[in-house]
Amino acid sequence: MLTESPIVAFTILVAVIFIVPPIFERLRLPGLVGLLVAGVILGQNGLKLLNSDSETIELLSDIGKVYLMFVAGLEIDLEQFRQTKNKSIGFGILTFLVPLVAGIAVGRLFDFSWNTSVLIGSLLASHTLLAYPIVSRLGVVTNEAVTVTIGATIFTDTGALLVLAVCVGIHQGEFTAISFATLLGGLAIYAAIVLFGFDWAGKEYFRRTGDEEGNQFLFILLALFVASVGAQIIGVEKIVGAFLAGLAVNDVLGNSRVKEKIEFVGSVLFIPCFFVDMGLLIDLPAFVKTLSSVWLTAAIVFALIGSKFLAALFAKLLYRYNKSELLTMWSLSLPQVAATLAAALVAYETVNPAGDRLINEGVLNSVIVLMLVTAILGPLITARSASNLIVSGTDTTANNLSNWWHKDEGETEEKKRNPFLVVVPIYNPQTQRYLLEMAAMLARHEAGQIVPLAIAKAGSHMDDPQLTDILDRTDERLQKAVKICKEFNVEASPSLRIDDNVALGIGRASREKNASLVVMGWGYTAGFRSRLFGNLIDLVFLSSHCPVAVTRLFTSPAEIRNILVPIDNLTRRAIATVRFAQILADTNQAQIVLLHVCDRRMPSNQMQYFESQLSEIVSDGNLQVSPKIQTIANDDVARTIIEQAKNFDLVVLRSVRYRTAGGLAVSEVTTRVIKELKCSIVLLGEPRS
């Protein structure tokens, strides 16, 4: 009786999602594999604690399925697609049609109907960018082959879902030319309504509601489920509508906090429920029996691997890419997870009036094996091939703080003539002097000026007597800040702002002043971790239009002689951290060491290649400081950085974000490093734009 209770079922699901994925990730296996295994163990062939037919599991799985496709639409980088639109469409057509034809051939070889064979082909045609974090970490996202592959995702996923919609429509009713034309016409009209209508409505709503993130979150959720329901009304599977909704609101959300919240809710709850339900659907004896006759499974797996390689080979010949770019395009387009699993489950659950499924259990089980094989194989190949890619040096070039995070192209002369402004929020007298000293060094290097900023927090009543006292104390702090700036011969323009939110006040003031940099500190009051990661600094990182340098200084910046900069990849943001350290060192004749901690299994030639690329980038420019590069092979990145930092005065870190229930925080490695370091720290947050 307990297992039939919705609350008990939900509790078990939450426990599985909380416990299982981290265990599998420690074993270097994808967490979603653990969710599938947990579903098998807890299902009808195991402990019988969960039932796929229960209303609770069915509801959560359905939500997870549409959420998965919605997030797939959100994750497609439309800006990158626009940059290489023609080549992305070209590779998208290749990596869609070649696997489609291969899948149809496999289906016909095993005596499936034409409709089922086409559906099998569509399952192979899409791909999931499972290895994107790897190319991002290696700093090769700007390589054209990578950008083209990422852009091709929009074509392959859309095409695969459209084929699914047609195949499901044909399977559920008698096929005629009129019904086929009606289905395609209705789908085209519906897609146009969702893509253009939801985009317009979203931009209007977000413009009118401003910072009302709660209502904006609900608006996006409503758009998701309205699109899903609308797709069912016109006779199309709901995941098609969900994917279209994701594409439609992609530009609306951008990189906002609302997008982070939406993806967080899906990634920690609904999408894992879908994978657990996939495990519940696996009939273990039938699964073993399917694998015992390996021919169908082997044919599907090899058809996918071979056809994706063939598509990448055609692209290599067409666009004149090298071998490393060929292998990277192939491996990035190899994993079959999101669209493939969702579409396979839809096809398996689609039953015609005669009681026949669109695909049988053997095909479903083969697709699950395909997902496991490609989810492991794809990232492994990407890690090896992407490390040999070449990145354009112009993307990481910057010689001064005025353009260290801006792209040079498209920057107007008027913007270049603007004075360099460093906004320094003043809120802790204990850290104020060192903070202003560092800002003064940077501003003096750039012939700029400092804006000491004080935020007086107040509500809606401007006649509150307490506000007068706050303003008086704030004005005193600003006058002291101006005196400190004069000691370093730097012009200071103090600014006082009344705001009900300190973090947003800092972001708004820096935008109004057109600041080039925000330099702020932190103290030890009221929960170090909460203060650093959960509240003020996190919100400033999110709201600021320019870089933010959060400092913890134990000594005067003028006494800093040795600077350590851990660097994990060659992205523009990572190199910006190096530029910041170089310019800071240039003011002080300090020494810089760039520390790259790599995997123990990384070949020596790849280490040397990374070092040569990094050396070429950091030596380019007019700065006098020439950093030393040190590479250490160790799996414990945080411990290595902490040990190496013992001989340095300052460590410059980059805020690589991850999602939490409270919003955003920096990575686990950075969190641990900050907690244990005994020297001064600068934590650099890049702008969100």
Image: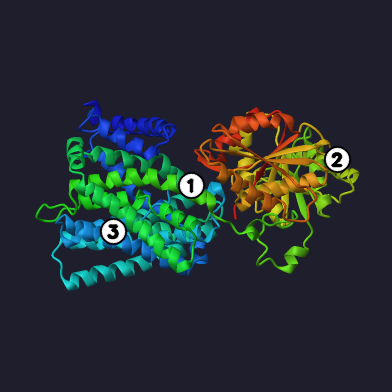
- Type of residue at label 1? Arg
Looking at the image, what colour scheme do you see?
rainbow
Label 1, on which residue?
384
How many neighbours does mark 1 have within 10 angstroms: few (below 14), some (14-19), or many (20 or more)?
Answer: some
Tell me if label 2 and label 1 are in contact, CB under 8 Å. Answer: no
Q: Which amino acid type corresponds to the residue marked 3 in the rendered image?
A: Ser
Establish if 232 lies above or below 378: below
The answer to whether residue 397 is seen in the rendering is yes
Q: Nearer the viewer, residue 665 or 278?
A: 278
Tell me the quadrant of the picture where the N terminus can be found: top left
Residue 505 pos. (x, y %): 67, 48
Amino acid of disc 2 = Lys
The residue where tag 2 is placed is 480
Q: Quadrant of residue 74?
A: bottom left
Q: Kindly tell me whether residue 459 is visible in this rendering.
A: no
Q: Nearer the viewer, residue 296 or 187?
A: 296
User: Mark 1 vs mark 3: which is more N-terminal?
Assistant: 3
Callout 3 touching callout 2 (CB < 8 Å): no
Q: Position of residue 556 (x, y in %)?
A: 82, 35
Indicate which disc residue 122 carries: 3
Q: Is residue 269 above or below residue 392?
A: above
Q: Earlier in the sequence, mark 2 or mark 1?
A: 1
